Image (cartoon, grey):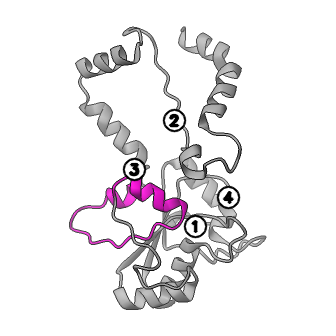
Amino acid sequence: APVVKALPSSITSISLGYQYAARSFELEDVKNHSLETLGMQDISPSSFKDLFGRISPRVVLAGTSVHFNNSEYVPEQSAIIAAKELGIRTVGVLDFYLKLNERFSDKDTRNLRYMPDVIAVPNEYSVGLLTLENIPKERVRVTGNPYFDSLKKLQETTSKDKILEIRRDLGLNPEATAIMYASHPIDGTFGKKYHYNENDVLEERSEEHTSELQSQFRI
C-alpha cells in the first residue's frame, strides 16, 4: 500500500490487496479492490490473465510474498506468471529478506519462475543477498522503502518546538536519548494466531539489551 500511495498522480492504478495486505491498504487509506469487484474467481494465473486481458495494464507491480497457510497459489507469483505470458512488464517490490528463494522460485528449486523484470529493493545489502540467489544484478534497483521514506520526510519537516512538545506529552526528558522500537504490527495483522505480539517481543528484547544500550548511548 505505501508503494501505491507514493505513485505520482499521473499514474492510474488498480490495486488488489489480498487477505493480510487488504488491511495495509485500509490503514494507508488507499483504494483497494477485492477479487469480487475485479471479477476474479481466484488467485490463479489464469484468473490474473483474464483480468489483465480486460484492463490491459502497461506494468504489473507486485509484492514478493511466499506461500502461506498451505495455499496453492501466491497472488503475486500468479500475477507475474500471467503478465509474462501476455508480454506485460513486471516490477516486484522486496521489503523483507527471509526465504528469498521461495519468493522467486518454486519450492525446493532455483528455477526463478516468478522473477519479475525489475526487483525494487530498500538498500544495497538486499542487492548482495539477491545475487547470492543467482538473480542478475542488472534486474535489481535500489529504491528505498516508502514506509521509511515517509518517516524521513516527517523528520525533515517537524520543527524543534514540535519535537519538544511531543516529548513533553510523552513525559520524556528533553535532553534524554529516545530510542524508538518499530515492529511489524503483529497484533493488527495476525491477531492471536502466533500467541505473542510486538509488545511481548519488546519486553523480552529490552531486558536483554538494556545494559548494552546504556553503555553505547550513555543513558
Q: Give the labeled residue for mark 3.
A: 146
**Residue at label 4?**
132
Q: Which residue is mark 2?
A: 182
Task: Give the quarter of the image for residue 60.
Answer: bottom left
Identify the amino acid type marked 2. Ala
The answer to which of marks 4 and 3 sits earlier in the sequence is 4
Q: Crowdedness of circle 2 by 10 Å Cα count: few (<14), some, many (20+)? A: few
Q: CA distance from mark 2 to mark 4?
A: 28 Å
Q: Is residue 177 left or right of residue 149?
A: right
Indicate which label's residue lies in the foreground, 1 or 2.
Answer: 2
N-terminal label among 2 and 4: 4
Reading the chain from its start, which is encountered first: label 1 or label 3?
1
Res 31 → quadrant: bottom left
| Residue 166 image position (x, y, % from top left) | 33, 21
Badge 1, how many Cα within 10 Å: few under 14, some, many 20+?
A: few
Q: Quadrant of the N terminus?
A: bottom left
Query: Is 187 contained in the magenta span?
Result: no
Residue 136: mark in rendering: 1
Which residue appears at 38% of the width and 76% of the height?
59
Work out how far the residue at label 3 is from the one at label 2, CA to CA, in angstroms.
15 Å
In the depicted structure, whether residue 110 falls above or below residue 178:
below
Amino acid type indicated by mark 1: Pro
Q: Amino acid at mark 3?
A: Pro
Image coordinates of residue 37 in percent, x first then y, are: 40, 79
- Secondary structure at badge 3 equals helix
* Residue type indicated by callout 4: Leu
